[in-house]
Image: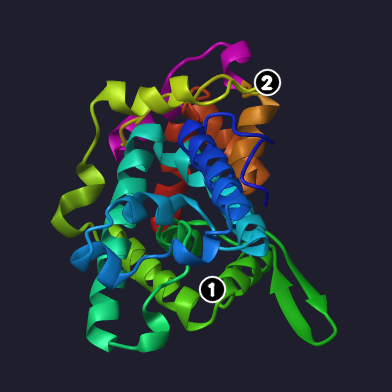
């Protein structure tokens, strides 16, 4: 499981976020201010240093955290490919806002001097992404090491655990707040999963990001979920032999999400090589 074809093809939001994390972390690291960038109840609500709200989202406190965090963000680009950049933008914004508010409330409630400044970085987005990762990405392979059984998802969980405990309580609180934010998104609180940005906002990130080299054609954005009747209609729709056979890149994208290769190919055939629609078909088949 590697999140699909290499690079940031069809994932402009993720690409922008990862590049911003590298730039902010390096910039403030050179200035020696990395340890002072985390969210602080006193700084935000009492001293009104609102710039920290933005900086704390992108700048990691240390190089090891940047490495593990960037790796997880890069892997989780699979969700942007799955739901489209527009809806993924809503997920990103919701995760960041909700997790940041929870962190500030947690600091005020706990009143612990050791938590005056939490660790910085996009912990809210990263750990929100573990919620759909747990529920929506199936295990494709399992293997044993001595008496222990691992799956292809184990390495992602281990990287997340390393990041979660990197600064002990200072990183544990942001991580737990991110998981809670992801859970709220999943249960569709305030119907957030139906929200979409105007197209020009989502496409702004595509223009802002560096262009990808090669890779498959862009995904159809925000393809509506197929109903049972639409799926059945796709099964029976006459198609030419050339249109029936999906590309290897499209199959690889679905296989990287954890779906069986043969099922992925058949879903692409029925969805006429639309990856978003094929993903909906596969997810619906698993839920029945």
Q: Quadrant of the C terminus?
A: bottom left
- Residue 213 is marked as 2
Q: Residues within 10 Å of mark 1 (few under 14, many from 20)?
A: many
Residue 238, placed above or below residue 75: above
Relative to 59, 158 lies left or right: right
Which residue is depicted at the point 64% across and 67% down? 159
Nearer the observer, 92 or 114: 114
Which residue is depicted at the point 29% across and 21% down? 200
Nearer the observer, 121 or 136: 121
Residue 252, position in %: x, y?
A: 67, 37
State the separation of the CA atoms marked 1 and 2.
33 Å
Q: Residues within 10 Å of mark 2 (few under 14, many from 20)?
A: few
Residue 20 can be seen in this image = yes
The magenta stretch is 227-244
Sequence-first tag of 1 and 2:
1
Which residue is depicted at the point 47% across and 82% down? 169
The answer to whether the residue labelled 1 contacts the one labelled 2, judged by CB atoms less than 8 Å apart, is no
SS at mark 2? loop
Residue 27, placed above or below residue 239: below
Name the residue that disc number 1 marks: 164
């Amino acid at each position: 499981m590697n999140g699909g074809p290499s690079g940031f093809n069809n994932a402009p939001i993720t690409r922008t976020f990862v590049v911003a994390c590298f730039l902010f972390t390096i910039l403030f690291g050179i200035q020696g201010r990395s340890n002072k960038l985390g969210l602080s109840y006193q700084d935000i609500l009492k001293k009104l240093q609102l710039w920290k709200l933005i900086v704390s989202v992108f700048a990691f406190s240390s190089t090891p955290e940047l490495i593990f965090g960037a790796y997880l963000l890069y892997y989780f680009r699979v969700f942007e490919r799955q739901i489209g950049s527009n809806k993924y933008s809503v997920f990103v914004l919701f995760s960041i806002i909700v997790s940041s508010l929870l962190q500030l409330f947690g600091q005020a409630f706990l009143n612990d001097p050791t938590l005056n400044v939490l660790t910085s970085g996009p912990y809210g987005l990263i750990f929100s992404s573990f919620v759909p990762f747990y529920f929506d990405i199936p295990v494709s392979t399992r293997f044993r090491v001595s008496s222990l059984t691992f799956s292809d998802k184990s390495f992602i969980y281990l990287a997340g655990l390393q990041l979660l405990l990197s600064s002990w309580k200072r990183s544990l609180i942001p991580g737990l707040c991110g998981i809670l934010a992801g859970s709220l998104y999943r249960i569709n609180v305030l119907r957030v999963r139906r929200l979409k940005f105007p197209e020009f906002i989502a496409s702004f990130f595509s223009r802002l990001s560096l262009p990808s080299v090669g890779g498959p054609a862009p995904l159809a954005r925000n393809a509506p979920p197929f109903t049972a009747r639409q799926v059945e209609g796709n099964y029976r729709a006459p198609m030419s032999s050339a249109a029936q056979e999906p590309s290897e890149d499209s199959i690889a994208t679905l296989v990287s999400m954890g779906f069986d290769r043969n099922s992925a190919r058949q879903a692409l055939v029925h969805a006429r090589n639309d990856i978003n629609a094929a993903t909906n078909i596969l997810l619906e088949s698993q839920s029945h």
